Image (cartoon, rainbow, N blue to C red):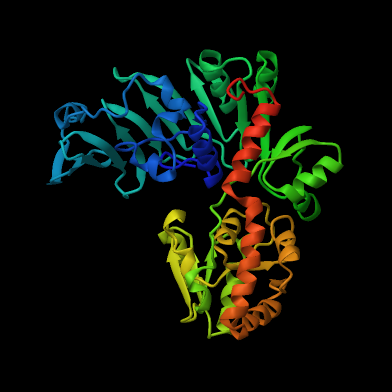
Amino acid sequence: MSPKIFGYESTQTYRHAVLRKHGIANKFLVTTPFVLEHDYQRLRVMGFEPEDVINLPGTYSDMDTTTFTYTLEAFEKTLEVGAQLLKEGPQYRIYKVANGFIDVDTNLDGFVVGILHRNANLEIVSTTFCSQGPYYTAYGNDEQSFEYYNRDGSIAISGYYQGPKEYPVVSYYLDEEEFKEEDLVIRYLDEHGAEKDVIIKDQLQSHFPGLIAYAEERGMIFRDVLHYNHYHGLEHNKNYQTVLPNKLLTASPYLNQRLVEEGYDATFIHPVGVAVASHPPMGLSSNKVFLSSHFNRIKRVDMAIEAFRQVPELELHIYGGMANEVEKFRKTHPIPDNVILKGFVDTALIPRHSFTAYLSCSISEMYANAMVESLGVGLIPILSKVDFGHNQVLDKLDYGTGFETVEELVEVLRKLVAWPTDYRKQVSEKVLEIAQEFSHDEAESALLNWLKSVGSRDVE
Protein backbone atom coordinates (compact mmCIF):
# COMPACT_ATOMS: atom_id res chain seq x y z
CA MET A 1 0.00 0.00 0.00
CA SER A 2 1.24 3.47 -0.84
CA PRO A 3 -0.09 6.98 -1.48
CA LYS A 4 -0.99 5.79 -4.99
CA ILE A 5 -2.61 2.41 -4.31
CA PHE A 6 -4.50 0.73 -1.53
CA GLY A 7 -5.10 -2.93 -0.78
CA TYR A 8 -8.10 -4.15 -2.73
CA GLU A 9 -9.06 -7.01 -5.00
CA SER A 10 -11.73 -7.63 -7.60
CA THR A 11 -13.72 -9.10 -4.70
CA GLN A 12 -14.32 -5.65 -3.23
CA THR A 13 -15.33 -4.08 -6.51
CA TYR A 14 -17.60 -7.02 -7.32
CA ARG A 15 -19.41 -6.78 -3.98
CA HIS A 16 -19.64 -3.01 -4.44
CA ALA A 17 -21.29 -3.47 -7.85
CA VAL A 18 -23.79 -6.06 -6.57
CA LEU A 19 -24.89 -3.82 -3.70
CA ARG A 20 -25.27 -0.80 -5.97
CA LYS A 21 -27.28 -2.87 -8.43
CA HIS A 22 -29.78 -3.68 -5.68
CA GLY A 23 -29.89 -0.14 -4.34
CA ILE A 24 -28.04 -0.96 -1.12
CA ALA A 25 -25.89 1.90 0.16
CA ASN A 26 -22.29 0.87 0.81
CA LYS A 27 -18.96 2.56 1.44
CA PHE A 28 -15.44 1.24 0.94
CA LEU A 29 -13.38 2.56 3.86
CA VAL A 30 -9.65 2.92 3.18
CA THR A 31 -7.65 2.99 6.42
CA THR A 32 -4.22 3.62 4.88
CA PRO A 33 -3.04 6.81 3.12
CA PHE A 34 -4.28 7.09 -0.45
CA VAL A 35 -4.16 10.13 -2.70
CA LEU A 36 -6.16 10.87 -5.83
CA GLU A 37 -3.57 12.68 -7.91
CA HIS A 38 -5.79 14.38 -10.45
CA ASP A 39 -9.36 13.09 -10.48
CA TYR A 40 -11.49 10.04 -9.78
CA GLN A 41 -10.75 8.23 -13.03
CA ARG A 42 -8.40 5.75 -11.36
CA LEU A 43 -11.11 4.66 -8.93
CA ARG A 44 -13.50 4.09 -11.80
CA VAL A 45 -10.87 2.00 -13.58
CA MET A 46 -10.57 -0.07 -10.41
CA GLY A 47 -14.32 -0.63 -10.51
CA PHE A 48 -15.53 1.70 -7.76
CA GLU A 49 -17.95 4.59 -7.83
CA PRO A 50 -15.64 7.31 -6.46
CA GLU A 51 -18.20 8.82 -4.08
CA ASP A 52 -18.43 5.46 -2.31
CA VAL A 53 -14.70 5.25 -1.51
CA ILE A 54 -13.83 7.02 1.74
CA ASN A 55 -10.14 7.73 2.33
CA LEU A 56 -10.39 7.92 6.12
CA PRO A 57 -7.15 9.81 6.93
CA GLY A 58 -7.98 12.28 4.17
CA THR A 59 -11.28 13.18 5.86
CA TYR A 60 -9.33 15.08 8.53
CA SER A 61 -8.16 17.65 5.98
CA ASP A 62 -10.52 20.50 5.05
CA MET A 63 -9.30 20.50 1.44
CA ASP A 64 -11.40 19.59 -1.57
CA THR A 65 -9.18 17.11 -3.43
CA THR A 66 -11.13 17.57 -6.66
CA THR A 67 -10.35 21.29 -6.83
CA PHE A 68 -6.91 22.49 -7.99
CA THR A 69 -6.16 26.12 -7.17
CA TYR A 70 -2.55 26.07 -5.88
CA THR A 71 -0.63 28.48 -8.13
CA LEU A 72 3.04 28.52 -9.03
CA GLU A 73 3.23 32.02 -7.58
CA ALA A 74 1.95 30.77 -4.23
CA PHE A 75 4.42 27.89 -4.29
CA GLU A 76 7.39 30.11 -5.15
CA LYS A 77 6.65 32.25 -2.10
CA THR A 78 7.50 29.19 0.02
CA LEU A 79 10.96 28.83 -1.53
CA GLU A 80 14.00 29.87 0.44
CA VAL A 81 15.97 32.95 -0.53
CA GLY A 82 18.49 32.05 -3.22
CA ALA A 83 16.48 29.28 -4.88
CA GLN A 84 17.13 29.18 -8.64
CA LEU A 85 14.91 28.06 -11.50
CA LEU A 86 17.02 25.54 -13.46
CA LYS A 87 14.59 24.30 -16.08
CA GLU A 88 10.97 24.63 -17.09
CA GLY A 89 8.56 23.07 -19.54
CA PRO A 90 4.84 23.23 -20.33
CA GLN A 91 3.87 21.38 -17.15
CA TYR A 92 6.96 21.29 -14.93
CA ARG A 93 9.67 23.36 -13.29
CA ILE A 94 12.91 22.33 -11.58
CA TYR A 95 14.47 24.51 -8.88
CA LYS A 96 17.91 24.36 -7.25
CA VAL A 97 17.73 24.88 -3.50
CA ALA A 98 20.38 24.81 -0.80
CA ASN A 99 19.89 21.14 0.09
CA GLY A 100 19.04 19.71 -3.32
CA PHE A 101 16.38 20.10 -5.99
CA ILE A 102 12.63 20.61 -6.17
CA ASP A 103 10.58 19.36 -9.13
CA VAL A 104 7.13 20.88 -9.56
CA ASP A 105 4.41 19.40 -11.78
CA THR A 106 1.38 21.38 -12.93
CA ASN A 107 -1.85 20.39 -14.64
CA LEU A 108 -3.10 21.70 -17.97
CA ASP A 109 -4.58 24.75 -16.22
CA GLY A 110 -1.20 25.64 -14.72
CA PHE A 111 -2.00 24.73 -11.10
CA VAL A 112 0.51 22.81 -8.99
CA VAL A 113 -0.40 19.14 -8.49
CA GLY A 114 2.89 17.63 -7.31
CA ILE A 115 6.15 18.62 -5.62
CA LEU A 116 9.18 16.32 -5.46
CA HIS A 117 12.07 17.27 -3.15
CA ARG A 118 15.40 15.50 -3.79
CA ASN A 119 18.69 15.95 -1.96
CA ALA A 120 22.04 16.66 -3.63
CA ASN A 121 22.45 12.92 -4.32
CA LEU A 122 19.03 12.91 -6.03
CA GLU A 123 17.55 10.76 -3.26
CA ILE A 124 13.91 11.50 -2.51
CA VAL A 125 13.40 13.65 0.57
CA SER A 126 9.65 14.07 0.20
CA THR A 127 6.79 13.82 -2.27
CA THR A 128 3.85 16.20 -1.97
CA PHE A 129 0.46 16.03 -3.69
CA CYS A 130 -1.45 19.30 -4.03
CA SER A 131 -5.02 20.44 -4.64
CA GLN A 132 -6.06 23.74 -3.01
CA GLY A 133 -2.56 23.78 -1.52
CA PRO A 134 -0.07 21.15 -0.37
CA TYR A 135 -2.42 18.32 0.65
CA TYR A 136 -0.32 15.26 1.46
CA THR A 137 3.41 14.72 1.94
CA ALA A 138 5.16 11.35 2.11
CA TYR A 139 8.72 11.51 3.44
CA GLY A 140 11.54 9.34 2.16
CA ASN A 141 12.86 8.65 5.64
CA ASP A 142 13.29 5.27 7.34
CA GLU A 143 10.09 5.83 9.32
CA GLN A 144 8.06 6.25 6.10
CA SER A 145 6.21 9.11 7.76
CA PHE A 146 3.53 11.25 6.15
CA GLU A 147 1.35 14.30 6.80
CA TYR A 148 -2.03 15.56 5.60
CA TYR A 149 -2.57 19.34 5.65
CA ASN A 150 -5.42 21.81 5.93
CA ARG A 151 -5.87 24.79 3.61
CA ASP A 152 -4.09 27.07 6.10
CA GLY A 153 -1.02 24.81 6.04
CA SER A 154 -1.56 23.26 9.46
CA ILE A 155 -1.17 19.50 9.88
CA ALA A 156 -4.56 17.77 9.79
CA ILE A 157 -3.25 14.30 10.68
CA SER A 158 0.15 12.61 10.49
CA GLY A 159 1.55 9.13 10.86
CA TYR A 160 3.99 6.49 9.71
CA TYR A 161 4.02 3.01 8.21
CA GLN A 162 5.05 0.11 10.40
CA GLY A 163 5.08 -2.33 7.47
CA PRO A 164 2.58 -4.74 5.88
CA LYS A 165 3.51 -7.56 8.30
CA GLU A 166 3.13 -5.44 11.42
CA TYR A 167 0.00 -4.51 13.37
CA PRO A 168 -1.18 -1.91 12.91
CA VAL A 169 0.17 -1.35 9.40
CA VAL A 170 -0.13 2.41 9.94
CA SER A 171 -0.08 4.52 13.10
CA TYR A 172 -1.63 7.99 13.14
CA TYR A 173 -1.22 11.09 15.28
CA LEU A 174 -3.97 13.65 15.77
CA ASP A 175 -3.49 16.49 18.27
CA GLU A 176 -0.53 14.54 19.72
CA GLU A 177 -2.75 11.51 20.40
CA GLU A 178 -1.90 8.21 18.71
CA PHE A 179 -4.58 6.41 16.70
CA LYS A 180 -4.74 3.01 15.05
CA GLU A 181 -6.47 2.22 11.76
CA GLU A 182 -9.47 0.79 13.58
CA ASP A 183 -9.80 4.04 15.55
CA LEU A 184 -10.33 5.92 12.29
CA VAL A 185 -13.08 3.47 11.36
CA ILE A 186 -14.75 3.87 14.76
CA ARG A 187 -14.64 7.67 14.54
CA TYR A 188 -16.22 7.48 11.07
CA LEU A 189 -18.96 5.12 12.27
CA ASP A 190 -19.66 7.39 15.24
CA GLU A 191 -20.79 10.02 12.77
CA HIS A 192 -22.17 7.96 9.90
CA GLY A 193 -23.01 4.51 11.27
CA ALA A 194 -26.32 3.14 12.56
CA GLU A 195 -27.73 0.09 14.29
CA LYS A 196 -27.88 -3.01 12.05
CA ASP A 197 -25.24 -1.65 9.69
CA VAL A 198 -23.01 -4.42 8.34
CA ILE A 199 -19.22 -4.01 8.56
CA ILE A 200 -17.14 -6.40 6.44
CA LYS A 201 -13.38 -6.44 6.99
CA ASP A 202 -11.61 -8.12 4.11
CA GLN A 203 -8.40 -10.11 4.21
CA LEU A 204 -8.30 -11.53 7.74
CA GLN A 205 -4.64 -11.12 8.68
CA SER A 206 -4.87 -9.06 11.86
CA HIS A 207 -7.76 -8.46 14.22
CA PHE A 208 -9.44 -5.14 15.03
CA PRO A 209 -10.62 -6.00 18.57
CA GLY A 210 -11.67 -2.44 19.37
CA LEU A 211 -13.82 -2.26 16.24
CA ILE A 212 -15.40 -5.65 16.97
CA ALA A 213 -16.34 -4.53 20.48
CA TYR A 214 -17.63 -1.20 19.18
CA ALA A 215 -19.83 -2.88 16.56
CA GLU A 216 -21.33 -5.23 19.13
CA GLU A 217 -22.06 -2.36 21.51
CA ARG A 218 -23.73 -0.32 18.74
CA GLY A 219 -25.83 -3.24 17.48
CA MET A 220 -23.90 -3.49 14.21
CA ILE A 221 -23.00 -6.72 12.41
CA PHE A 222 -19.25 -7.27 12.02
CA ARG A 223 -17.53 -10.03 10.04
CA ASP A 224 -13.97 -10.75 8.99
CA VAL A 225 -13.51 -12.41 5.60
CA LEU A 226 -11.08 -15.32 5.32
CA HIS A 227 -9.57 -15.12 1.82
CA TYR A 228 -6.77 -17.66 2.19
CA ASN A 229 -6.28 -21.31 3.11
CA HIS A 230 -6.17 -21.27 6.91
CA TYR A 231 -5.28 -24.96 7.10
CA HIS A 232 -2.39 -24.64 4.66
CA GLY A 233 -0.99 -21.95 6.94
CA LEU A 234 -1.33 -24.17 10.00
CA GLU A 235 0.34 -27.11 8.29
CA HIS A 236 3.15 -25.39 6.39
CA ASN A 237 4.03 -22.13 8.18
CA LYS A 238 5.51 -22.43 11.66
CA ASN A 239 5.04 -18.68 12.18
CA TYR A 240 1.34 -18.77 11.30
CA GLN A 241 -0.57 -17.76 14.43
CA THR A 242 -3.90 -16.40 13.16
CA VAL A 243 -6.79 -17.25 15.46
CA LEU A 244 -10.11 -17.33 13.63
CA PRO A 245 -13.16 -15.62 15.13
CA ASN A 246 -16.17 -17.84 15.72
CA LYS A 247 -18.27 -15.86 13.21
CA LEU A 248 -16.73 -15.18 9.83
CA LEU A 249 -17.23 -15.09 6.08
CA THR A 250 -15.12 -17.24 3.78
CA ALA A 251 -14.07 -17.09 0.14
CA SER A 252 -14.30 -20.82 -0.56
CA PRO A 253 -17.28 -23.18 -0.33
CA TYR A 254 -14.91 -26.08 0.35
CA LEU A 255 -13.00 -24.36 3.15
CA ASN A 256 -16.33 -23.18 4.54
CA GLN A 257 -17.60 -26.75 4.79
CA ARG A 258 -14.64 -27.81 6.92
CA LEU A 259 -14.97 -24.78 9.19
CA VAL A 260 -18.68 -25.49 9.78
CA GLU A 261 -17.85 -29.10 10.62
CA GLU A 262 -15.42 -27.78 13.25
CA GLY A 263 -18.10 -25.61 14.85
CA TYR A 264 -17.50 -22.19 13.29
CA ASP A 265 -20.38 -19.93 12.27
CA ALA A 266 -18.95 -19.64 8.76
CA THR A 267 -20.72 -18.46 5.61
CA PHE A 268 -19.39 -18.69 2.07
CA ILE A 269 -19.78 -15.50 0.03
CA HIS A 270 -18.59 -15.67 -3.58
CA PRO A 271 -15.59 -13.35 -4.11
CA VAL A 272 -16.79 -12.83 -7.68
CA GLY A 273 -19.50 -14.14 -9.96
CA VAL A 274 -19.19 -14.88 -13.64
CA ALA A 275 -21.39 -14.69 -16.70
CA VAL A 276 -21.33 -18.29 -17.91
CA ALA A 277 -20.92 -18.51 -21.68
CA SER A 278 -23.51 -20.38 -23.75
CA HIS A 279 -20.88 -22.12 -25.89
CA PRO A 280 -17.17 -23.07 -25.77
CA PRO A 281 -14.56 -20.38 -26.50
CA MET A 282 -13.52 -19.45 -30.03
CA GLY A 283 -9.90 -20.25 -29.24
CA LEU A 284 -10.60 -23.86 -28.27
CA SER A 285 -8.77 -25.25 -31.33
CA SER A 286 -5.78 -22.93 -30.83
CA ASN A 287 -2.43 -23.70 -29.19
CA LYS A 288 -2.72 -20.80 -26.72
CA VAL A 289 -2.82 -21.26 -22.94
CA PHE A 290 -3.62 -18.44 -20.51
CA LEU A 291 -2.03 -17.80 -17.09
CA SER A 292 -2.89 -14.83 -14.87
CA SER A 293 -0.49 -14.24 -11.99
CA HIS A 294 1.97 -12.03 -10.18
CA PHE A 295 5.49 -13.35 -9.72
CA ASN A 296 5.30 -14.35 -6.07
CA ARG A 297 6.95 -17.72 -5.46
CA ILE A 298 3.65 -19.30 -4.34
CA LYS A 299 2.37 -18.90 -7.92
CA ARG A 300 5.28 -20.96 -9.33
CA VAL A 301 5.41 -19.14 -12.66
CA ASP A 302 8.89 -20.58 -13.21
CA MET A 303 7.35 -24.07 -13.09
CA ALA A 304 4.95 -23.15 -15.89
CA ILE A 305 7.77 -21.74 -18.03
CA GLU A 306 9.92 -24.84 -17.58
CA ALA A 307 7.04 -27.09 -18.65
CA PHE A 308 6.30 -25.02 -21.76
CA ARG A 309 9.96 -25.09 -22.69
CA GLN A 310 9.45 -28.83 -23.15
CA VAL A 311 6.20 -28.48 -25.13
CA PRO A 312 6.98 -26.00 -27.94
CA GLU A 313 3.73 -26.88 -29.74
CA LEU A 314 1.86 -24.70 -27.22
CA GLU A 315 2.06 -20.99 -26.37
CA LEU A 316 1.80 -19.66 -22.81
CA HIS A 317 0.53 -16.09 -22.41
CA ILE A 318 1.25 -14.77 -18.90
CA TYR A 319 -0.83 -11.78 -17.78
CA GLY A 320 0.24 -9.96 -14.63
CA GLY A 321 3.06 -8.08 -12.98
CA MET A 322 3.99 -4.43 -13.23
CA ALA A 323 6.64 -3.39 -15.75
CA ASN A 324 9.51 -3.48 -13.23
CA GLU A 325 8.46 -6.94 -11.98
CA VAL A 326 8.29 -8.33 -15.51
CA GLU A 327 11.69 -6.88 -16.37
CA LYS A 328 13.24 -8.32 -13.20
CA PHE A 329 11.75 -11.72 -13.99
CA ARG A 330 13.14 -11.61 -17.54
CA LYS A 331 16.63 -10.95 -16.19
CA THR A 332 16.54 -13.92 -13.81
CA HIS A 333 14.68 -16.47 -15.96
CA PRO A 334 15.47 -17.50 -19.55
CA ILE A 335 12.17 -17.15 -21.42
CA PRO A 336 11.54 -19.55 -24.34
CA ASP A 337 9.99 -18.26 -27.56
CA ASN A 338 6.63 -19.90 -26.81
CA VAL A 339 6.17 -17.95 -23.54
CA ILE A 340 4.83 -14.40 -23.88
CA LEU A 341 4.92 -12.05 -20.87
CA LYS A 342 2.01 -9.65 -21.35
CA GLY A 343 2.45 -7.65 -18.13
CA PHE A 344 -0.43 -6.07 -16.24
CA VAL A 345 -3.69 -5.88 -18.19
CA ASP A 346 -7.04 -4.98 -16.66
CA THR A 347 -8.89 -8.24 -16.10
CA ALA A 348 -11.86 -7.08 -18.17
CA LEU A 349 -9.57 -6.57 -21.19
CA ILE A 350 -8.00 -10.04 -21.23
CA PRO A 351 -9.30 -11.94 -24.33
CA ARG A 352 -9.99 -15.22 -22.53
CA HIS A 353 -12.20 -16.49 -25.36
CA SER A 354 -9.14 -16.62 -27.65
CA PHE A 355 -7.44 -19.33 -25.56
CA THR A 356 -7.97 -23.06 -25.25
CA ALA A 357 -6.93 -23.56 -21.61
CA TYR A 358 -6.24 -21.82 -18.31
CA LEU A 359 -3.16 -22.73 -16.26
CA SER A 360 -2.43 -22.23 -12.56
CA CYS A 361 0.60 -23.68 -10.76
CA SER A 362 -0.21 -22.15 -7.35
CA ILE A 363 0.98 -23.83 -4.16
CA SER A 364 -2.27 -22.88 -2.39
CA GLU A 365 -5.61 -21.56 -3.62
CA MET A 366 -9.03 -20.71 -2.28
CA TYR A 367 -11.70 -19.48 -4.65
CA ALA A 368 -9.13 -18.58 -7.34
CA ASN A 369 -10.89 -15.63 -9.01
CA ALA A 370 -8.88 -15.94 -12.23
CA MET A 371 -9.73 -19.63 -12.48
CA VAL A 372 -13.43 -18.99 -11.89
CA GLU A 373 -13.49 -16.28 -14.56
CA SER A 374 -11.86 -18.72 -16.98
CA LEU A 375 -14.34 -21.49 -16.12
CA GLY A 376 -17.12 -19.10 -17.07
CA VAL A 377 -15.62 -18.80 -20.56
CA GLY A 378 -15.23 -22.57 -20.88
CA LEU A 379 -11.43 -22.73 -20.88
CA ILE A 380 -9.99 -26.15 -20.02
CA PRO A 381 -8.49 -25.80 -16.50
CA ILE A 382 -4.96 -27.16 -16.06
CA LEU A 383 -4.43 -26.89 -12.31
CA SER A 384 -1.96 -27.79 -9.58
CA LYS A 385 -3.48 -30.33 -7.20
CA VAL A 386 -4.09 -28.09 -4.18
CA ASP A 387 -6.99 -27.28 -1.86
CA PHE A 388 -9.34 -25.50 -1.65
CA GLY A 389 -9.79 -23.97 -5.07
CA HIS A 390 -8.25 -26.48 -7.48
CA ASN A 391 -8.75 -30.06 -6.29
CA GLN A 392 -12.52 -29.80 -6.08
CA VAL A 393 -12.80 -28.49 -9.64
CA LEU A 394 -10.43 -31.20 -10.89
CA ASP A 395 -12.52 -33.88 -9.17
CA LYS A 396 -15.74 -32.60 -10.74
CA LEU A 397 -14.19 -32.28 -14.19
CA ASP A 398 -12.39 -35.66 -14.04
CA TYR A 399 -10.43 -35.31 -17.29
CA GLY A 400 -6.95 -35.72 -15.81
CA THR A 401 -5.85 -32.09 -16.09
CA GLY A 402 -4.27 -31.85 -12.63
CA PHE A 403 -0.56 -32.06 -11.79
CA GLU A 404 1.93 -31.88 -8.91
CA THR A 405 5.32 -31.75 -10.64
CA VAL A 406 6.84 -30.25 -13.77
CA GLU A 407 6.93 -33.71 -15.29
CA GLU A 408 3.21 -34.23 -14.65
CA LEU A 409 2.42 -30.78 -16.07
CA VAL A 410 4.39 -31.62 -19.23
CA GLU A 411 2.36 -34.82 -19.53
CA VAL A 412 -0.94 -32.88 -19.24
CA LEU A 413 0.21 -30.32 -21.82
CA ARG A 414 1.17 -33.03 -24.30
CA LYS A 415 -2.21 -34.63 -23.74
CA LEU A 416 -3.85 -31.28 -24.54
CA VAL A 417 -1.85 -31.05 -27.78
CA ALA A 418 -3.11 -34.50 -28.79
CA TRP A 419 -6.77 -33.79 -28.05
CA PRO A 420 -8.76 -33.08 -31.24
CA THR A 421 -11.08 -30.07 -31.25
CA ASP A 422 -14.21 -32.21 -30.82
CA TYR A 423 -12.80 -33.75 -27.65
CA ARG A 424 -11.74 -30.35 -26.31
CA LYS A 425 -15.30 -29.18 -26.96
CA GLN A 426 -16.63 -32.07 -24.87
CA VAL A 427 -14.35 -31.07 -21.98
CA SER A 428 -15.25 -27.38 -22.35
CA GLU A 429 -18.97 -28.10 -22.19
CA LYS A 430 -18.50 -29.88 -18.87
CA VAL A 431 -16.42 -26.93 -17.64
CA LEU A 432 -19.35 -24.62 -18.40
CA GLU A 433 -21.65 -26.88 -16.37
CA ILE A 434 -19.29 -26.64 -13.39
CA ALA A 435 -19.11 -22.86 -13.83
CA GLN A 436 -22.83 -22.50 -13.10
CA GLU A 437 -22.16 -22.73 -9.36
CA PHE A 438 -20.02 -19.59 -9.68
CA SER A 439 -22.54 -17.61 -11.76
CA HIS A 440 -23.65 -14.04 -11.08
CA ASP A 441 -27.04 -15.28 -9.88
CA GLU A 442 -25.44 -17.64 -7.35
CA ALA A 443 -23.01 -14.97 -6.15
CA GLU A 444 -25.65 -12.26 -5.76
CA SER A 445 -28.06 -14.60 -3.98
CA ALA A 446 -25.39 -15.72 -1.51
CA LEU A 447 -24.55 -12.13 -0.53
CA LEU A 448 -28.13 -10.88 -0.32
CA ASN A 449 -29.38 -13.94 1.57
CA TRP A 450 -26.60 -13.60 4.13
CA LEU A 451 -27.31 -9.89 4.64
CA LYS A 452 -30.96 -10.73 5.20
CA SER A 453 -30.15 -13.58 7.59
CA VAL A 454 -28.04 -11.39 9.89
CA GLY A 455 -30.65 -8.63 10.01
CA SER A 456 -29.05 -5.93 7.87
CA ARG A 457 -31.19 -2.79 7.94
CA ASP A 458 -30.72 -2.40 4.18
CA VAL A 459 -32.17 -5.74 3.07
CA GLU A 460 -35.80 -6.71 3.51
Residue 262's quadrant in the figure?
top right
Residue 436 occupies which quadrant of the picture? bottom right
Image quarter of residue 310 = bottom right
Q: Position of residue 14 (x, y in %)?
A: 52, 42
Q: Position of residue 452 (x, y in %)?
A: 66, 27
Query: Residue shown at 64%/64% (left/top)?
Result: 431
Query: Where in the figure is residue 377, as x and y percent of width and height?
Result: 54, 62
Asked whether 247 or 375 is in front, the reply is 375
State the residue at coordinates (29%, 19%): 151
Relative to 191, say whether 184 is above or below.
Answer: below
Q: Quadrant of the C terminus?
A: top right
In the image: residue 41, left or right of residue 60: left
Residue at screen point 62% across, 25% down: 198
Say left or right for 246 vs 143: right
Q: Would residue 247 be visible to someone looking at this image?
A: yes
Farthest front residue? Answer: 278
Residue 166 visible from this viewpoint: no
